Amino acid sequence: MKNLLFFILGTLLVSCHSVEKYNARLEKKIPAELLKQDVDYAYRQLLDYHPDLDWFITEDSLRNTFTALKNSINRSMTSKEFYFDLQAVIAQIRQAHTYVDFPSRKYTKREEKKRKNTIGPFSQFRTNYSEEGLYVVPSKADDVGLPVGISIVEVNGYPVKDYYQKYRKLETSDGYNETFIDRIMSKSFSTFFTYEHGLKDSLRLTFDKNDSLFVKTVYRKKLDESKSIKTKDSLHLTRKERKQRELKNFYFGYDKINKQFAIELQYPTQDSTIAVLNIRSFVKGYPKKAYAEVFEKLKQSNVQYLILDLRDNGGGYLRDSGELFSYLSDSAIAFTQKAHITQKNSLAKNYHKMFSGPRKYTLMPLWLGASIATIFKTKKDQNGDYLYTISSSKPKKIKENNYRGVLYVLQNGGSYSATSILISMLDQYTNAVFVGEESGGNYNGTIAGFIVPFTLPNSQLELNIPLMTICPNLKNQHRQGRGNFPDFIVETTLDDIFYGRDPVLDTALRLINSE
C-alpha cells in the first residue's frame, strides 16, 4: 500500500511538471530557421498522406503558398504566433477536416478536478457571432436570464469585434462553399475567446442596449445548482420507468447541458400523418436502436409526410448516416464508394497515432492487429490508385420499416461531412424536396474518415491530416466544391432567431398543406 501511494504521488508530480513544462513552451520563442523546418515537414506529410490534395488547389499553387510562408518567416515566434501563419496556409487547401490544432494551455489534474461537474460561463447561454456582432439568442441551456437579442460588445474588457476577421481567414469548408464557414463562425466566439485567454471561471459581459452600456458577470456553477438536476417528476418514477428513461436517453443521445436529444421525433400539428425527425448529430446516441424505434412509430402512425431536419448536423459516423439512408431509400445500394488513400500502408503506418497515453500501450494488441488488417483491405485499381474497403462501401439491405411516404429535408450550411454525404445520396436516390440554404461541404465527397495528428518537430503544433477520400455512391457528379442547393431557398434572419421563428420548417409545412 505504501509503495502504491508513492507511485500515485510520483505520477501526479510528473504529470504536474509535464503540464507546467508544456505551458511554458507555449510562450517560448522559436528561431525562424526551426519554424521553416516545420513548414517543410508539414508540406512533406501532406504530400505523402493527404489524398486528392489538389482537389481545390493546384500543385503549383500549393507549393508556392508554402514557399511564400517560409520566405515570410524572418523572426522568432511562439507556437501560438506560428499557428496563425500556418493555419492560414492550410485553409487554402480548402478541406475543413485538414487543420492545425490551436496550441491551447493544458491544465493540471488539480485544476481539472476543480472544474469537474461544473458548467462554464459560456455554456450557460448561447450566442450568434457574425460581422454584425455577437448577439444573445434563445437556448434551452440558458440559466443566466440574459435578454434575447441583446448585443455583447465586450467580454472581460476585450472587444468582441476584434476576433471575427482574425479567425475568419483561418476557417474553410470543403471547396468553395461559404455557408459552412458562416455557420461555424456563428457558434465559435467562445472557442476563439478561450484560445486567447484560456478557460475562465467568470465572464464580465458588457452589453449595448439602446446606445447604453451595462454589465453582467456570469460565473461558473456546479451542476447540482443548475436546472439539469432531477425534476420532481423523475423522483416519482418506478425503477422500471427510470430504466426506460435511461435507455431512451442513451439510444436517442440526450444532451444534459442543452436539454435535447440528438435523435428526436415530433408531430408538429394535430395531424399525425405529418412528422418531423430531427437528427442533430451522427455521433451521439445509439442510432441503430433509435432509428428502429422511430420508423416503427412512423409506420404505426401511418405518417405520409416526413420532414427530416438535418440543419446544423455537422456529421459524425458514416455508419450512422448510412443506417438512416437505408430507412429512406428503396434501393439496396452502397452508401459510399471505396475510400481513396495515397499508399497501401498509409493507414497501417499511422494507426498508432489515434491512441495516446497509457491506452497506446494497453490497447497495443488491438490497434496493431487492426492496422495490419488495413493493408489487406487496401487494393490497387486499374488506374494505380489505392482503394480501401470501408463498411459503407458495401451494399446495405433495405430496412423492413423502410419509409415510403413524401420526404422533405431541411438543410443549412451546418449540414456537413457525413450529413453532406447523406444529403447527396437522398438527392439522387429519393424524391426528397430540400428546403433551406446550400448545405455545407462538397456535394461530391469529403476527405476525412481517418484523421491523424502529425506533430511538427520544433513548434510541437499538431497538423491533422485526413487519410481517406470518401465519396457518396452517386449516379452523377455535381458542381465541384459546392453543397446541395435546395429546391426552396429560405434564409433564417437574426430576427427569426431572436423571436423563435422557424421559416424553414414553416415553408415545409406550407408546401405539405398545399398538396
Image: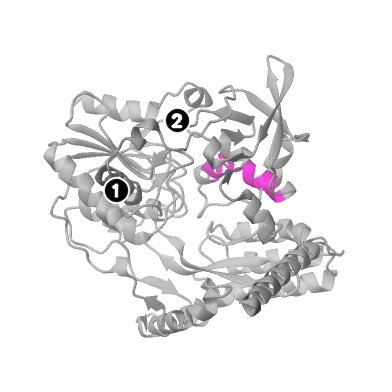
Q: Main secondary structure of the magenta part?
A: helix
Of the numbered discs in the image, which one, if any, rests on residue 243? 1
67 or 111: nearer the viewer: 111
Answer with mark 2 or mark 1, whichever residue precedes in sequence: 1
Judged left or right of residue 288, residue 458 is right
Horizontal side, residue 429 vs residue 35: left or right: left
Q: Residue at x 58, y 33 (%)?
A: 127
Locate the N terminus by quadrant. bottom right
Question: Could one spot residue 360 in this view of the protein?
Answer: yes
Front: mark 2 or 1: 1
Q: Is residue 288 left or right of residue 357?
A: left
Quadrant in which residue 500 is drawn: top left
Which residue sits at x=60%, y=29%? 135
Disc 2/disc 1 C-alpha distance (Å): 42 Å
Residue 387 image position (x, y, % from top left): 38, 76
Label 2 sits on what residue type? Glu
Looking at the picture, which amino acid does disc 1 mark? Lys
Within 10 angstroms of label 1, few (less than 14), some, or many (20 or more) residues? Answer: few
Picture layout, residue 365 above or below residue 330: below
Work out whether residue 515 or residue 358 is closer to the camera in this orientation and state it: 358
> Residue, x 47% and y 24% (percent of image)?
496
Answer above or below: position of 67 versus 250: below
For the view shown, which residue lies furthest in the right direction? Answer: 75
> Where residue 233 sits in the image (x, y, percent)?
34, 32
In the rendered image, the vertical position of residue 94 relative to residue 339, given as above or below: above
| Image: magenta residue range | 181-195
- Residue 414 is one of the magenta-drawn residues: no
Quickly name the residue at label 2.
491
Q: Nearer the viewer, residue 450 or 173?
A: 450
Which element is circle 1 on?
A: helix
